[in-house]
Image (cartoon, grey):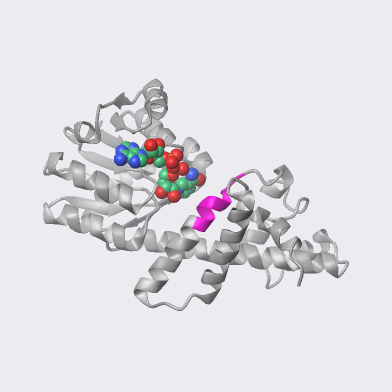
């Protein structure tokens, strides 16, 4: 049994902490929202009065927070309180620069740390089927891997500090761009009198094949489990897609990478979100594209 502090008990962090309790760990949690603390308590988490109090006795400290500014602020608060042997793991999706700053803050105190963002959404958090993408030293990864495995089905060591965040935003930039491409193709097919099923049957076994088509098809019918068959309920909300595309654009700007399609995807998802679709599944962008005239 390991003593694990878990800061940020929201949609993702709450069920992740609950899975660590189920795995037999002593989990001490903290969140600013009382209702999240109450749910965590019901799941067997010991709730502390502050983030600092939660980490004092912990061997492993996990943060699952909205953005880089929250992670840097919480790590600034807790670092002076942690044991010298503690391992810090940030599972939030944040910008690469903030992730590297957080690692540097830990390193300055001689502490091991890992950035380990996830994919798999709330369903993956509840079912312990998340994929973790980790960045940090081999030693930090070796210590973290058994704990992360109890919240997910796959844990990938992507490289040094920040590499987990880099992998996450590069993957989601592919996803955002490819979903728009697939949606545009279905909209064009409709104009040309080609049925959804016919396009799917050809493209899913031809060179247009991709996850956005074959697993997450944005029109109802060809893939019965895709959100298009369920009124575009998420799934993966458009607001989160926009967040990740913006993180990719920040990283492109600070690293000097040319990502013109990533930039276009961020703009299109900003328009889609701005039209009131933040809570829709991101594949719902097909309805937005259908409404645009050439
Ligand atoms: P959420 O808003 O439900 O949870 C974040 C929690 O952090 C909230 O409960 C909030 O009260 C808490 N918090 C904020 N500041 C705090 C502080 N100073 N101290 C303690 N608690 C604090 O968000 P979420 O959906 O759980 O997402 C968490 C992270 O996971 C985000 O970075 C998100 O991008 C990423 N993510 C989310 C999903 C998803 O499907 N929801 C999927 C993959 C990755």
In the image, residue 241 lies in the stretch drawn in magenta: yes
Image position of 55 (left or right of 115): left
Report the magenta residues as a range: 234-242
- The quarter of the picture where the C terminus appears is bottom right
- Res 137 seen here: no
The count of marks equals: 0
The residue lying toward the viewer, choosing from 114 and 149, is: 114
- Position in image of residue 96 (x %, y %): 34, 62
Residue that sits furthest to the top in the current view: 42
- Position in image of residue 18 (x %, y %): 40, 30
Q: Place residue 210 in its image quadrant.
A: bottom right
In the figure, 188 relative to 30: above or below? below
The residue lying toward the viewer, choosing from 253 and 64, is: 253
- The quarter of the picture where the N terminus appears is top left
- Res 127 seen here: yes
Image position of 71 (left or right of 42): left
At a point 38% along the width and 35% down the height, the residue shown is 9
- Position in image of residue 146 (x %, y %): 32, 43
At a point 71% along the width and 67% down the height, the residue shown is 184
Image position of 20 (left or right of 83): right
In the figure, 289 relative to 66: above or below? below
In the figure, 56 relative to 219: above or below? above
The residue lying toward the viewer, choosing from 71 and 146, is: 71
In the image, residue 76 lies in the stretch drawn in magenta: no
Which quarter is ligand 1 in?
A: top left
Image position of 21 (left or right of 77): right
- Position in image of residue 240 (x %, y %): 51, 52
In the figure, 99 relative to 81: above or below? below
At a point 39% along the width and 46% down the height, the residue shown is 66
């Amino acid at each position: 049994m390991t003593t694990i502090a878990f800061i940020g008990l929201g949609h993702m962090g709450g069920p992740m902490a609950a899975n660590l309790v189920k795995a037999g760990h002593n989990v001490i949690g903290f969140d600013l929202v009382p209702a999240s603390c109450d749910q965590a308590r019901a799941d067997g988490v010991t709730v502390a009065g502050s983030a600092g109090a939660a980490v004092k006795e912990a061997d492993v400290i996990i943060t699952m927070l909205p953005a880089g500014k929250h992670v840097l602020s919480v790590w600034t608060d807790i670092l002076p309180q942690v044991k010298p042997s503690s391992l810090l793991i940030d599972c939030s999706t944040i910008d690469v620069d903030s992730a590297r700053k957080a690692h540097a803050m830990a390193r300055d105190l001689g502490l091991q740390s890992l950035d380990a963002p996830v994919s798999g959404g709330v369903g993956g958090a509840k079912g312990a089927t998340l994929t973790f993408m980790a960045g940090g030293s081999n030693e930090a990864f070796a210590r973290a891997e058994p704990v992360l495995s109890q919240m997910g089905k796959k844990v990938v060591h992507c490289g040094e500090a920040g590499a987990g965040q880099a992998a996450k935003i590069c993957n989601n930039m592919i996803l955002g761009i490819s979903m728009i491409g697939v949606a545009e193709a279905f909209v064009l097919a409709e104009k040309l009198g080609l049925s959804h099923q016919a396009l799917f049957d050809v493209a899913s076994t031809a060179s247009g094949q991709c996850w956005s088509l074959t697993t997450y098809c944005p029109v109802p019918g060809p893939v019965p489990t895709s959100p298009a068959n369920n009124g575009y309920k998420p799934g993966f909300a458009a607001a989160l897609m926009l967040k990740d595309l913006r993180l990719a654009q920040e990283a492109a700007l600070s690293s000097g990478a040319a990502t013109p399609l990533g930039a276009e995807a961020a703009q299109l998802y900003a328009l889609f979100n701005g039209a009131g679709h933040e809570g829709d599944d991101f594949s719902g962008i097909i309805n937005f594209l259908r409404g645009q005239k050439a």
